Amino acid sequence: MEKNQYLDMFIEESREHLQAINDHLLHLETNPGQKEIIGEIFRSAHTLKGMAATMGYEEITNLTHQMENILDGIRNGTYEAGTTLIDIVFEAVDHIERMVEDIASGGTGKADVKDVLSKLFDLENNGVQSEVAAVMEKPRSEESTFDDFELTVLSQSMEQGYVPYTVKVILREDCILKAARVVMIFDVLEQIGEVIKSTPPVEELEEEAFDSQFTLTFLSKESADEVKAHIFKVSEVEAVSVDEVVIDKPEPVLDDGNEEVKETAKELPQEQDTKKQASANKTIRVNIDRLDALMNLFEELVIDKGRLEQISADLNNHELTDTVEHMSRISGDLQNIILTMRMVPVEQVFNRFPRMVRGLAKELNKHVHLEVSGAETELDRTVIDEIGDPLVHLLRNSIDHGVETPSERIKKGKPEQGTIHLKAYHSGNHVFIEVADDGAGIDRDKVLAKAVSKGAVPEKGKENLSDSEVYNLLFSSGLSTRDEISDISGRGVGLDVVKSKIESLGGNVTISSKKDEGTTFSVQLPLTLSIISVMLVEVEKEKYAIPLSSIIETAIIKKSDILRAHNQEVIDFRGRVVPLIDLKKIFNVPKEPGQADEHYSIVVVRKGDKMAALIVDTFIGQQEIVLKALGHYLNQVFAVSGATILGDGQVALIIDCNTIIR
């Protein structure tokens, strides 16, 4: 019960610490000498280990503990933070991430981590062997073998009157059950104090993976002679030495003689503490489910507000009208506050990309640098949840298709390392996210040839297509210019999925490119999906909502203005031939008997560069509505993206213009 109570907190904080480890490992790879970065990684790993141990997740504890040993080695200068070492630590972090996500999805958090543990053990052992000479020449002090947590425990225990001892025990050579003797020694010591550390670790002592001696760090209020006497009560003990541990400073972990590092180490925690304190005073952590519940309640309030406005207009009562207008202003302010509360920075999505780009670049033997800007730009959580996968597709495409290999780039006179710029920014009621690379650019002729061979473009007239129209062909399903199929891209899927996903979010994506200079994908997204502005229209006696973001213009045309082309009714709209679509036919609306009208009311809508004119009976007007999903039973309804409840209590379907325009 208690475990479940803290499970959400454990998962949330584990994710934060894993993200911090990922970010700092990437920085460490480019700045291997910065010990403050190692300190940050170590702190996150140590906290994660402590939390996992408290919650009883043994595999995470063991893996993090072994990872800590490596990080400790880097901190103490035993190992160099090279690419191979960082790869193995990343691999360990990946396993921990998978175990945490397994716990989050209701699993046990258990996983087979023998391989990565073995790699970490090998790394630790090989590193120690290679540095034996250096270690012998420059022995480290006892204090340097303690981590932050252990030093804190030692310091606090000393304040309570405990004396820290280093206890070295040598068992007799003819001792048969070494593990049993170790257990007995631990038992007698724990009667007079507490063992806080053992070398080798307890697991190895229990498995008898040691010669005949081991060392303990022991806290007790007894004297050294009394401690020694207790240990000698256990048989088959050859020799015992008990020395008091001298600790000059409570936090000597970064004390390597480098004055600059010491200064940073002293200042950093204070600065962080100040920031944490300030942050804790101004913000609270709220479960997102509660914000969703608040949003749902507010959506109901918006619907009721619409009904009240309708009733007020019908009754024409002055006092009621004033009250409703005041309530509308208050609900408008409330809407802004709630929407702001739900806004989260795109950083949450961007954070996972540096690691992904590093891995893909290594896989493809390319040198790629990812620049991120505008990560603080905020989007509604519903959009954030959906935008991650399309951006992954675009980044993978840029690395695989865009950035050239180092040798190709050198031939072209470019730097060996390619750059991908991931950028987010606000503009009006939209957020733009750009993925720009300085790679080879899109080969127009190659795309066109592929499109013609696939039948996507007729041979005749292909030269008349603009660059933009040619690049947009890449969003066609099954069209890939990649000669070889790989696991990363080249199967003709990806960009069409990206486009449909972004359009389903009410956004759009465009491409611009220059040969040998690079390609930019620009994604335009709405700030929120929950409350949208629409044009309400009537078709016979049914009401429909058309999102304003899709509407270009409304107009009334004469029946005589309608033309026919390719067995399709069309109109001439500002010099462009636009197909005419009757919503009665699309939604099978029963036609009421009456006189044929000589005029048609139309709504011209767009999907990217394509347009269509929708025939309706009446324009009702512009309104802000709450978008409600149709649910699983109606998710296949053609050209309908959802529904809303109007002020008069009627349900209006929201038209999905992107589906109507093909």
Image: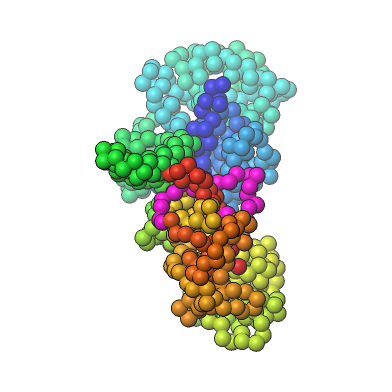
- Is 639 inside the magenta-drawn segment? yes
Q: Nearer the viewer, residue 308 or 37?
A: 308
Q: Which residues are magenta?
A: 621-640
Q: Residue 428 location in percent, x, y?
A: 36, 60
Residue at 60% from the left image edge and 71% from the top image edge: 474
Q: Residue 211 location in percent, x, y?
A: 66, 31
- Is 299 inside the magenta-drawn segment? no
Q: Nearer the viewer, residue 467 or 159?
A: 467
Vertical placement of residue 171 versus 623, above or below: above
Q: Residue 581 location in percent, x, y?
A: 57, 67
> Quadrant of the rendered structure where residue 484 is?
bottom right
Residue at 43% from the left image edge and 44% from the top image edge: 647
Residue at 39% from the left image edge and 37% from the top image edge: 252
Can see residue 88? yes
Residue at 68% from the left image edge and 44% from the top image edge: 115
Q: Nearer the viewer, residue 594 or 2?
A: 594
